[in-house]
Image (cartoon, rainbow, N blue to C red):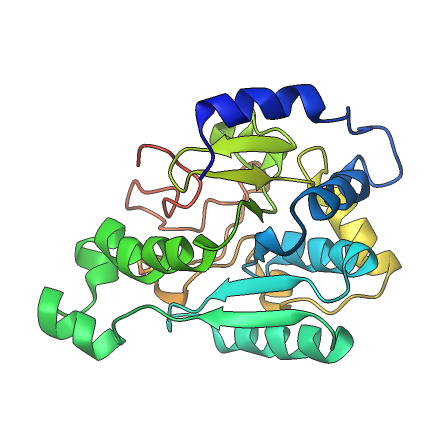
Amino acid sequence: MITFESWNELQDQVPDFPADSETKGALETLQWAYDTYGEKLVYACSFGIEGIVLIDLISKVKPDAEIVFLDTHYHFKETYETIEKVKARYPELNIRMQQPEMTIEEQAAEFGADLFASNPNKCCEIRKIIPLQKALAPSTAWISGLRREQSESRANTNYLNLDKRFEKIKVCPLIHWTWKEVWRYVTKHELDYNVLHDQGYPSIGCAPCTKPAFSMDDIRAGRWSGSGKTECGLHTTNP
Ligand code: SF4
């Protein structure tokens, strides 16, 4: 568990990651994080486009890294296909599918059908937050693909963050990357990615809660569209 005291101590030990390096500090942050936390570092990946970049960078630093996917059972088939392609390209990576405790049927029996529509926060809690809590339990730190540009709520994200919800260090190597830079990297390295990105989905989550977004001013506009919800709760301290 990370306490405020240990977080404050950590601030004195962390190098300044070079935001002007070739990877805008991402590779350097990952190298430091794996050197520091080793097996106690896990990447929770949604296999969106930032995830594709991060996996490629991680494979250069720790080819057998542990990667967790929160398998809500509501994902698009294209997302599962993307995971299979990634597994084939990086066979050494340890990619795990973290399951929720309830099947969709069990959840419907207890809370009613389509909880994602009647109470999306509860649905995210059951199918994302609690599973991530379990996945992170043995770890000290976790990696996330957050970028500052993604939304106002992410604009102050740092390379290292104190994650009060999960009581871990959250490592965010891509904070300075722009949308264009992410795609430039994917294209340059000919990486496989979720084909839904080519069909108007800049941000891809669970199928019932993800719609295409037509404004590049808000690339997360298609997530929980029209419900007022903007985050699943994994990246908010007080949802
Ligand atoms: Fe449920 Fe939607 Fe949250 Fe997925 S994104 S866990 S379907 S509410």
Q: Quadrant of residue 80?
A: bottom right
Quarter of the picture containing the C terminus is top left
- Ligand 1 is found in which quarter of the picture? bottom left
Q: Is residue 158 left or right of residue 129?
A: right
Q: Quadrant of residue 45?
A: bottom right
Q: Is residue 218 left or right of residue 33?
A: left
Q: Quadrant of residue 57?
A: bottom right
Residue 61: x percent and y percent?
Answer: 80, 54
Quarter of the picture containing the N terminus is top left
Q: Is residue 210 left or right of residue 120?
A: right
**Nearest the eye: 61 or 155:** 61
Who's the residue at 83% across and 58% down the image?
Answer: 60
| Figure check: 151 above or below 35 | above
Who's the residue at 25% across and 49% down the image?
Answer: 121
**Nearest the eye: 139 or 53:** 139
**Nearest the eye: 201 or 156:** 156
| Figure check: 39 above or below 102 | above
Residue 148: x percent and y percent?
Answer: 61, 32
Who's the residue at 69% across and 73% down the image?
Answer: 86
Who's the residue at 21% across and 67% down the image?
Answer: 114
Tally of numbered tags: 0
Asked if one can make out residue 209 in the rendered structure from this viewpoint, the answer is no
Residue 70: x percent and y percent?
Answer: 45, 64
Q: Is residue 127 left or right of residue 217?
A: left
| Figure check: 64 above or below 120 | below
Asked if one can make out residue 191 in the rendered structure from this viewpoint, the answer is yes
